[in-house]
Image: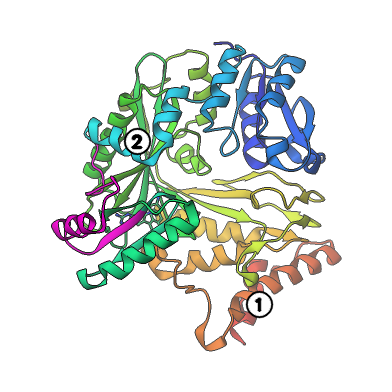
Amino acid sequence: MPVTKVLIANRGEIACRVIRTCREMGIPTVAVYSEADRGALHVRMADEAYFIGPAAARESYLVVEKIIEVCKKSGADAVHPGYGFLSENAEAAKRFKAEDITFIGPNPEAIVSMGSKTAAREVAIAAGCPVVPGIQKTMSDEDLLAESQKMGFPVMLKAAMGGGGKGMRLVAKPEEFASSLARARGEALSSFGDDSVYVEKAILQPRHIEIQIFSDTHGNHVYLWERECSVQRRHQKVIEEAPSPHVTPEMRKAMGEAALKVARAVNYVGAGTVEFLADADRNFYFLEMNTRLQVEHPVTEWITGLDLVKWQILVARGEKLPMTQEEIPLNGWAMECRVYAEDPDKNFMPSPGKITFLRIPSGRNVRDDSGVYEGADVPMFYDPMISKLSTWGPTRLEAIDRMRAALGEYRIGGIRHNIAFHEVLMEHGPFRDGALHTGMLDKPFWKKKEQGPNLKFAVAAALMQEMDAEERRAAKPASTEGKPDAWKHWGKFNQI
Ligand code: MV4
């Protein structure tokens, strides 16, 4: 299939990122933008840009017919969906195919079979990929209790129509089962309109470890190692890294091969991610498969030295994968922090607005995938992630310390952001030790108990704002009496 002009059906940092690779490959690009994104960075970076409607995504970025119309108007023969929006919309993939527009993504059938968690689990079981013990069939209260006793407590009750952690309930012992089940059914009915519940063996303090896979149209499938994404808040990934401090070479090979079993089972094409839950004993269990390029792909690019968007384009053109499994490098360590326009002191609620001051970190082995610029507006209509800061080092601690230093350089004025939160995380003992699990942010360790509300954190944020204002006023580099500017203020936090 031809890919001679690419329409990026997305916005923000991922649109800018895809445009960058297209430019390196000499492929002209077409941006689409809503009312809220008229001045957005991706509009300025693309070779052409077309207005597609009101700010609401359902009236702009999600409208397949508008994307097809712009393809026809601009002569774009391929669409890159990015992530989110249309990236896992099988109907959209079919529509592009019907219009002879190359969809830079997987085949619609794979999107469908992996779109339903229960169907995906059945595919994984049939393919011989380990899944969490349990039965996803919905059953009577009595059968659920019998199944739970057979598996052994603790168990996890899950709403059949739930997902992303919604409608999950941990039951530690049999005497709690009846009341927990009643509440689980009630929540499922009120949240999803269906009180069906199933039961799985509970994986305690699990780690979220995912395998990046790549497949071409010639039946070749490879895995590009793993990423650990256990540091999450409300099921939203906050920090990702590659490789995982929990994974041994044997576990890496076993997880990679298990992931490829799933890819082969659905004749997968393109970039994909197979997500697993891993326990302390290094058992791993299939969770789901994402049929798109993920937000956190830069950490995989760092340790392999590959450009995953370039691979997507080559595969979409019908070319073979550029490497065999044996040729794929694994060098060093990479860390990624998602930078959100959110207010940590207002429970991380979104903080849209104009960016009045922006200094982006740089330097050796530092990468910032940004969708904004100084003066840009961060709209309220979309995900508040404005950029991803990633770093590489020969070891995990060097990647972490490079991240800590880079975060200390980051300056964003005009909106609230979570940079100080990441800085505290980079200093957090259990994080630095690699003792990660999906619940590690449940207890807001960054809030100093004796100080009530996270005062130190608020001071960090307030000082960051003050530093921005101060530096802007001085319009000259902060004095560096032996310490980088971020550290110059550090002592003030502890005087409180
Ligand atoms: C689990 C689990 C423990 N045991 N299943 C949450 C989101 C959904 N995709 C699956 N999730 C979980 N399923 C069993 N049998 C713990 C979680 C979980 C989790 C998983 C991955 C990443 C973050 C998580 C946060 C809380 C709970």
- If the image is split into quadrants, where does the C terminus sit? bottom right
The image position of residue 379, as x and y in percent, is 75, 50
On the image, numbered disc 1 is attached to which residue?
459
Q: Is residue 296 left or right of residue 255?
A: right
Q: Is residue 232 left or right of residue 384?
A: left
For marks 1 and 2 on the same chain, the one whose residue lies earlier in the sequence: 2
Placement of 327 over or under 340, stated as above or below = above
Ligand 1 rendered quadrant: bottom left
Q: Amino acid at mark 2?
A: Ala
Residue drawn at x 21%, y 34% is: 128
Q: Secondary structure at mark 1?
A: helix
- Is 212 covered by the magenta stretch? no
User: Disc number at residue 119?
Assistant: 2
The image position of residue 191, as x and y in percent, is 49, 56
Q: Nearer the viewer, residue 480 or 149?
A: 149
| Badge count | 2
- The magenta span reads 129-158
